[in-house]
Every structure is written in C-alpha cells, then in structure tokens.
C-alpha cells in the first residue's frame, strides 16, 4: 500500500465516511456492513469478520485494504477533493530574467493563510510567474524557475492532472453562460464535489458573497443578471469555500467592485495561499510580502514594514471615505464637505 497516505489505517471508518461520503459505495459493492464497527479502522474491521462470512462473500481480506485505499484516492482525485497530499508550503526557486540575469532572491516559501502581492509594470512578467506556479515549473520554462511543494519536487498530479490544479484563477471578467439561479449554480457545484449538505453550503457561499458585493443579491437571482462586482464576489466566495485548489490567484481585484479587504479575509480564513497581482498600494500593503517584477524576472521580494503598516491605516481611511462617497452617489445624494470631517472625527 502506498505510504503517501494510508488513509484507511489513519482514520476510523466513521471519519472516513464523513470525509469521503463516496466510501459508502465501496462497502455496498463488496457486501460489507460496518454498522456497529465505525470506531475501528478498515483493517481492524476486516480482522474481526467471521471466517464463515468471509467464505460466503468470497472476500479477499488481504487485498481489500489496498483496493479500498486506491478507490478513495482515485475518487477524490476525480472529484477534485484533497486527501492527505495537501499543500503545506509553496517554494519558488529563482531563475533568470529576460536578459538571463539571475533573479534577485534566494528562494521564496509561502504558507497557507499568507497573502503575497505581485507588483510591476504592465508586461513585466507577472503572468509568467503565475504560469510557472500553476504548472509547477521544473526548470523547464523560459524563466528557468523551479517550484517545490512541501519542500520537495511536486507530485506529477500537480502538473498533469486536470482535477488537481495548484491554482484557482479569478480573472477580471466573469461571464456566466448557464441560465441558472445563483442558488442553483452553487448547489450544483457543491453536489459535484459530493457535498451532502449542498443546500447549506450554497447558503454559506451566498452569505459570504453578499458580504463582498457592493449590491446584495439573492439565491433566486439569475447568474446571467449579476453585475461584474456581484459575479466576482460570488466566485471568490465559491473558490474560498468549495475549491480544492490550495492556491488562489486574483488579478487586479481593485477593479472588481467588491470589498477587497473582506475578499482577502474570506480566502485567508480557508487557509488558501493567495497571490494577488495589483497596482493598488492599499492591496499591496495588505499582503505579508510583495514580489517586485522587472524585465521578466523577480527583481526582489519585500516584507511589509511597520512603517508601511502605519501608512496602510491612512490608506484604509481614504478608501473608506471613497467608499462612502461612492455609496451616496449611488443613492442619488449630494456630497458634502462634512463627509470628510465625519471620517476624521
């Protein structure tokens, strides 16, 4: 049996069924009834079976554990569900820029729950960096960078499996082609991932999306009728709560028409690694570190300083002022000078 997970010996049957509901089908197919033995591991359960039952059902008790473990992994991979091979760290090893000059860092390791901003002029190479990460580059791209997952060369699944993508990308434009209501869309996505309480999960995502969107919407709102900001809010909440991808890439969230800080909080709360290409100084300083791209390469990696954190507070005040003014304009109100005085009070 593969040492990479050994799920069936790691968890009792009750927890396996909770984590992977499709495991019940394996028991049915093999005429196994673990009722009353849910506290045992699968191997322990097999060891206590009556010899007559084993003979009657023609059970291969020696081969079943390996078969069950393989079944769990293949089904989880097909559904895009992570098992034990979770990303605990992402490391970028340097390559060269367009002039073949070595990049200006030794290595960059990012942990779940961290936010990294990517800054640089248009066309400087931000997209190439993101592509290197998405495809787990191994010194085989124009930059010569290499990616490590959990400090090691990545499992081939991160490169070649359609169901195990490192990166979930949120582009600037979100266009839906299905004529579904928002609630139906979310429930279908949850059901496709074998989530039993799909309705409750859909409601949770919808609630999170409405916290991000400038204008609220309901489960009955057709997805084709959502504004750009509402669509982006829906997909950010959906990605945070349902996506199996451990890394989220957001491109220019400042243009999304959503609450940017809350959007980042939602993603980080789900232990995602967040990479954010931005030109917005407020967003850049919200990050733990920022990657500076020049001439196709990583010029340097900067940690956000205490002084920058103080500046961030001022920028957030200005952003709140702009947000209040924007909201009053939407409501058809006239803006007054005391709007700024209230903010400074």
Image: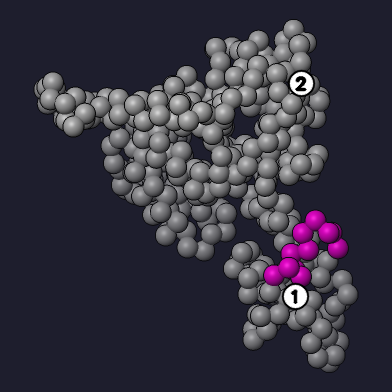
Q: Position of residue 170 (x, y in %)?
A: 51, 32
Q: Is residue 256 visible?
A: no
Q: Position of residue 167 (x, y in %)?
A: 62, 36
Res 320 quadrant in image:
top left
Q: Residue at x 75, y 37 (%)?
A: 148
Q: Residue at x 76, y 70 (%)?
A: 9
Q: CA distance from mark 2 to mark 1?
A: 46 Å
Please tell me whether mark 2 or mark 1 is closer to you in this view. Answer: 2
Q: Position of residue 60 (x, y in %)?
A: 86, 76
Left or right: 39 with respect to 60? left
Question: Which is more toward the observer, 177 or 68?
Answer: 68
Res 156 quadrant in image:
top right
Q: Residue at x 36, y 25 (%)?
A: 315
Residue matched to label 1: 42
Question: Which is more toward the observer, 92 or 20?
Answer: 92
As drawn, 92 above or below 77? above
Residue matched to label 2: 95
Q: Position of residue 302 (x, y in %)?
A: 59, 25
Left or right: 89 with respect to 286? right
Q: Looking at the magenta stretch, what is its main secondary structure?
A: loop
Please identify the quadrant where the N terminus is shown.
bottom right
Q: Residue furthest front?
A: 307
Please identify the quadrant where the C terminus is shown.
top left
As drawn, 192 above or below 53? above
Residue 287 tag number: none
Report the span colored magenta.
1-11
Q: Is residue 205 visible?
A: yes
């Amino acid at each position: 049996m593969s040492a990479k997970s050994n799920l069936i010996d790691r968890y009792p049957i009750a927890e396996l069924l909770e984590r992977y509901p499709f495991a019940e089908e394996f028991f049915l197919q093999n005429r196994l009834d673990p009722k009353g033995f849910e506290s045992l591991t699968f191997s322990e359960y097999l060891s206590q079976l009556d010899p007559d039952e084993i003979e009657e059902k023609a059970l291969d008790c020696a081969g079943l554990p390996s078969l069950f473990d393989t079944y769990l992994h293949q089904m989880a991979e097909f559904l895009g569900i992570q098992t034990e091979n979770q990303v605990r760290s992402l490391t970028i090893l340097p390559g060269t820029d367009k002039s073949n000059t070595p990049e200006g860092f030794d290595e960059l390791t990012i942990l779940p729950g961290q936010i990294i901003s990517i800054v640089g002029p248009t066309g400087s190479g931000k997209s190439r960096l993101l592509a290197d990460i998405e495809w787990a580059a191994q010194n085989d791209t124009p930059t010569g960078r290499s990616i490590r997952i959990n400090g090691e060369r990545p499992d081939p699944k991160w490169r070649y499996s359609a169901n195990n993508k490192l990166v979930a990308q949120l582009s600037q434009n979100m266009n839906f082609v299905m004529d579904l209501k928002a609630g139906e869309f979310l429930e279908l996505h949850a059901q496709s991932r074998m989530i039993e309480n799909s309705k409750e999960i859909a409601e949770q995502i919808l609630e999170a999306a409405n916290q991000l969107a400038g204008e609220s919407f309901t489960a009955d709102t057709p997805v084709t009728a959502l504004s750009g900001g509402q669509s982006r809010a829906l997909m950010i909440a959906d990605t945070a709560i349902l996506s199996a991808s451990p890394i989220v890439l957001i491109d220019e969230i400042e243009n999304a028409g959503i609450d940017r800080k809350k959007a980042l909080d939602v993603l980080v709360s789900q232990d995602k690694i967040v990479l954010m290409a931005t030109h917005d100084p407020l967003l850049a300083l919200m990050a733990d570190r920022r990657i500076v791209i020049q001439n196709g390469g990583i010029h340097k990696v900067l940690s956000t300083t205490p002084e920058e954190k103080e500046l961030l507070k001022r920028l957030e005040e200005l952003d709140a002022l702009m947000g209040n003014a924007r909201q009053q304009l939407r409501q058809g109100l006239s803006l007054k000078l005391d709007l700024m005085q209230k903010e400074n009070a």
